[in-house]
Image: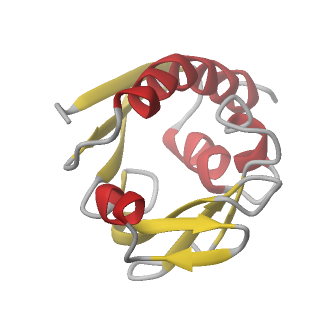
Amino acid sequence: MEDKKFNIEIDAPPSKVWETLWGDETYPQWTSPFCEGSHAVTDWQKGSKVLFLDHNKDGGIAMIEDKKPNEFMSLKMLGEVKGGVEDYESEAACGMAGGFENYTLTETNGKTYLEIHMGGTDFPKEMMDYMYDAWPKALHELKRIAEQD
């Protein structure tokens, strides 16, 4: 997969955007354009496993490779989940392994510039088309939530 970047400027400080990105209540809201019932199971600590799940308990498995609160989060993909069962060995799981998502927050004049950088693996074209469609919608939702008082 060629690396892909998505970005947005949000009229809120990095601390508010960070809370919106990873908060238990707000994460499912802004990620809803990816899938119904989207949620994450993790403690959001460096080195921790993250299960990104939908309402059927299907999704991806990642590890938090790096974390600098209010500045940077790096997620490394490890496999997938089907019906709540973790899979690290199937062809589909191995195809995801090694991929990454990096979230970088930069403050300028009280606003936050958020960039999501994805890459590191060859996702199927259908999945990438889906991501290209869903990411802008998700970022718009993130902006809406983070800019609320």
Q: Position of 94 compared to 63: left or right?
A: left
123 versus 41 height, above or below: above
Q: Position of residue 111 (x, y in %)?
A: 48, 24
**Residue at the spot x=76%, y=60% of the render?**
24
Q: Position of residue 22 (x, y in %)?
A: 62, 55
**Residue at the spot x=39%, y=29% of the render?**
128
Q: Dividing the picture into quarters, in which one does residue 23 lie?
A: bottom right
Q: Position of residue 77 (x, y in %)?
A: 37, 62
* Residue 75 seen by the camera: no
Q: Position of 56 compared to 68: left or right?
A: right
Q: Position of residue 133 (x, y in %)?
A: 52, 17
Q: Nearer the viewer, residue 69 or 55?
A: 55
Q: Position of 40 compared to 47: left or right?
A: right
Q: Nearer the viewer, residue 55 or 102?
A: 55
Q: Position of 80 compared to 72: left or right?
A: right
Q: Dividing the picture into quarters, in which one does residue 125 lie?
A: top left
Q: Nearer the viewer, residue 114 or 63?
A: 63
Quarter of the N terminus within the rendering: top left
**Residue at the spot x=31%, y=65% of the render?**
94
* Residue 21 seen by the camera: yes
**Residue at the spot x=68%, y=32% of the render?**
146
Quarter of the C terminus within the rendering: top right
